[in-house]
Image (cartoon, grey):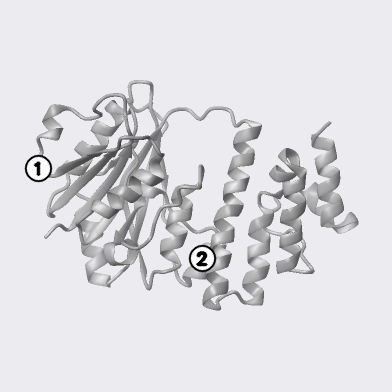
Amino acid sequence: MIDVSIVIPTYNRTQSVGQAIESCLAQDGLALEVVLVDDASSRMPVSSTLRADARIRIIELEKREGPSNARNVGLKAARGQYVKFLDSDDVLVANTLSQEVMAARQTDADIVVSNWGTRTVDPEWKPIPGSDSIQDCPVFGNVIDDVLVGKSTIISAALYRMDLVSNLKWDTDLKKLQDWDWFCQCALRAKRIYRLPLITSWWQHHASPRVTKSGALLQAQSHHHVLRKIEHFLRQGGFLSAQRKQRLAQYYYKEIRTLARCNYQQAVRALDHIFSLDAHFKPVDEEPSRIIRLLTSLFGVRRTIHIYALVKRQ
């Protein structure tokens, strides 16, 4: 029996994916498989030595369709009792995966979340000194309300029971926030999420490029796409109380200024939806600007956002 399947999509990342795979093979105390899904790379992404390891299964796609599709292919092929997803720039901390599995079995958890680290790397994928940062995973109680206040984790810091996720799919329509969407869809269906206060993975990344207007718009659109899916799930299940509608309205508002700056008509439609959820809506916890909150109290939300859009388009 395979305890854990680790699904890794990759595209032309020979050096980083090699580190990711080696970190998986360094895990002791359990039977695992690495399902590497090559999204039509221009060359074989792993060495002949790694390809010869029986724990590694390589699925080569003929056409590049993005990481979400690759993860769906890997999930369908996975044979483990539990599944973990890594990106090709993630590495696992040695001998921690067995502790995640043990925690899942002892607590009968559908999902185990754990702490993680982030670090910046140079072009050769070597860590830059002083760039390490540790993130604590959230504590989950009432999962629906926790999701609605933004509690989540990165892709590598969650272990899922296969029975929970085998019929779910990564959203191939999303170009950003895929990991947040996946976690939310799984968490909303989980009976128990257990928090393991242990660093189990590192996300390695290059210095972040400047955010462009098109990138910010795509982020905001993706944010609303995920929220619509959450809202649909809650409505279908009869979980969307008046209080949760109000919280959801606040969460939609989080990206409203980005929409107003980049695509005003989308912002207008988003505001219409916000007021359909909460007829007396006023931005609270998702509006960090005191000036905007003051203008909202004087002129109302719609007029304030209109003024903001006009100013930003000058």
Q: Quadrant of the C terminus?
A: top right
Can you tell which of label 2 and label 1 is closer to the viewer?
1
Mark linked to residue 65? none
Is the residue 247 above or below the residue 314 in the image?
A: below
Provide residue 308's location: percent of width, then percent of height.
82, 43
Give the labeled residue for mark 2. Answer: 146
Q: 83 or 199: which is nearer to us?
A: 83
Residue drawn at x 82%, y 56% is 301
Mark 1 neighbour class, 10 Å CA radius: few under 14, some 14 to 19, many 20 or more: few
Determine the residue located farthest toward the front in the rendered image.
62
Nearer-N-terminus badge (2/1): 1
Q: Which residue is mark 1?
A: 54
Q: Secondary structure at mark 1?
A: loop
In this orientation, does residue 139 appear?
no
Kindly identify the residue that appears in the image at 18 percent across and 43 percent down.
57
Q: Amino acid at mark 2?
A: Asp
Circle 2 packing at 10 Å, graded few (<14), some (14-19), many (20+), is some
In-front residue for pair 95/261: 261
Most distant residue in the top direction: 123
At a point 79% along the width and 36% down the height, the residue shown is: 312
Q: How many numbered marks does the figure carry?
A: 2
Taking the image as drawn, is residue 258 in sight? yes
Residue 12: x %, y % from top left: 33, 27
In this image, 70 relative to 247: left or right?
A: left
Going by the image, does 103 lie left or right of 127? left
Q: State the residue at coordinates (21%, 63%).
A: 102
The amino acid on which the numbered mark 1 sits, given as a three-letter code, is Ala
Disc 2 to disc 1, C-alpha distance:
40 Å
User: Is 306 left, or right, of 61 in this rendering?
Assistant: right
Element marked by disc 2: helix
